[in-house]
Image: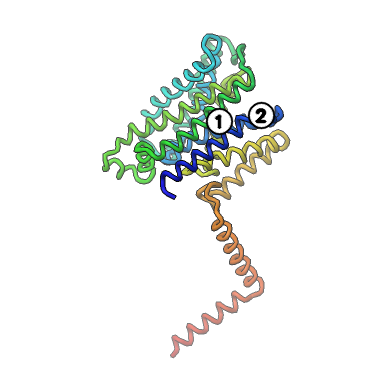
Amino acid sequence: MNSRQFLIRDLLVLFGLTGWAIALPGFASEFAVSMALTCLMYVALSSSWALFCGTTRYLSLATSAFFGIGAYTSALLLETLPWVQAIAMGSLIAAAVAVLMGAAVLHLRGTYFAVLTFGMTELIRHAISYFEKSVTGTVGRVLMVVPERDTIYFSVLALAVLSVALSIGIRRTRFGLAMLGIGADEQRAQTLGVNTRIVKIAGFALTAAIAGAVGAAMSVRWTYIDPHTVFNPFIGFQTVLIALIGGAMTIWGPLIAAIVFSVLAETLRLQVPQLYMMSLGLLLILSVLYLPGGLASLRAETFRGWKASLKSGWTELREDLSGETKRRKRREQQDRERRHVF
C-alpha cells in the first residue's frame, strides 16, 4: 500500500474504535466504564509520549509533571471557569512549563536527559507541596465542582482520539520527518537545515500539552488531589513502559499496550500488586529481548521465527544432553589433525 492508502486505513481504524468507545457507556457497567477511562487516559499519554520520544529517541520521564500541572490547574480554576476552558488552561500551562524545561535540558541526550527530566518532576512536586503547606496551609485540594461521569469520559475520549490523530497526521508532515531525522542522526539533520532545537522544544511542548489536558480532565475523578497523587512518578513510568512495550515508533502500539496494561491493572494490581509489577517488568524484558519493535510489530513471520529459534534451541539442547555435540567436535578435531599431517 502507498502512503495515502495507509492514511485512509489508519483513519478508518481510528473512526471504528472511536465509535465503539462512544457507545460503551450506554451498555457497559460502571466497572467497565472506569476501566475504559483508565485505558483512554494511558492511550492519550503514551501516544503523545511516543509521538515525540519515540521519533526523536529522547527518553523523557516528565509525563507525571505535566499531568500534575494540568490537574492542579483544573482544581484551581474549575470553580470559576467552564469545564473545557479549565482543561485548555491546564494544557497551556503544562506546555509553557515544557518550553522552559526543554530549553534548559534538550541539549542533553540519553541517561542525562532522562535523569534531569525526572529530577525536574520531583522539583515541581516538592515545590507545590512546600507552597501548599507554607503559604496556603493545606495538604491538598478538594474539588467542589465535579462534572458527571459521562462528561469526564467523553472528554478523555476526545483527548485520546486527538492524541492518536496527531500521531497519524504529524508523522506524515515535515515536522514529523524532522523529529524522525533527529532520532536517526541529529547532526546530519542539522546539516540538512533542520532547526533541531526549535523542533525538539515544539515536540516536547506538544506532548506536555496533551499530558496537561489529560491531567486536568482526570483530576475530577478523584475529587480530592494532593501532590503525591497527581505527581505520582508511577504515572510517568507506566506511560513509558506502555509506549515501549507497545512500540514507540508505531501509531497503534501504545493503544494496544494501553488496553493490555489496563486489563492487567484491574485484574492484578488490587489483588496481588507485586505480581502486577513483576508482569510489567517481565513484559518489558521480553519485549526488549524478543520484540524490540513492540507488540505492534507482531507478524506471522515473527511467530515463525520464534518457532524456528525454539526448534533450533531444542535440537542443540538434545544433542548436548546425548553427547552428540562432544562427539561431533571430536570428529571435527580429528579431521583437522589429519589435514594438518597430510
Q: Is residue 237 visible?
A: no
In depth, the one of 181 and 324 nearer the eye is 181
Q: Are marks 1 and 2 in contact (CB under 8 Å)?
A: no
Q: Residue at x 45, y 38 (%)?
A: 168
| Furthest residue in direction right, as rendered | 271
In depth, the one of 197 and 87 nearer the eye is 87
| Furthest residue in direction bottom, as rendered | 342
Q: Quadrant of the C terminus?
A: bottom left
In screen coordinates, is 71 left or right of 6? right
Q: Position of residue 67 (x, y in %)?
A: 52, 26
The correct choice, above or below, for 89 with respect to 33 in the image is: above
Q: Position of residue 171 (x, y in %)?
A: 41, 39
- Element under disc 2: helix
Q: Position of residue 81 (x, y in %)?
A: 51, 11
Amino acid type assigned to the residue bearing label 2 in the image: Val
Q: Which residue is mark 1?
A: 233
Q: Residue at x 53, y 26 (%)?
A: 214
Q: Residue 301, labelled with which disc? A: none
Residue 316, quarter of the rendered image: bottom right
- Element under disc 1: helix
The correct choice, above or below, for 146 with respect to 121 in the image is: above
Tally of numbered tags: 2
Q: Is residue 127 visible?
A: yes
Classed neighbour count for the residue bearing mark 1: other residues with Cα under 10 Å, few (<14), some (14–19), many (≥20): many
Classed neighbour count for the residue bearing mark 2: other residues with Cα under 10 Å, few (<14), some (14–19), many (≥20): some
Q: Residue at x 51, y 39 (%)?
A: 12
Q: Residue at x 49, y 23 (%)?
A: 124
Q: How is the image coloured?
A: rainbow
Q: Which residue is mark 2?
A: 33
Residue 177, quarter of the rendered image: top left
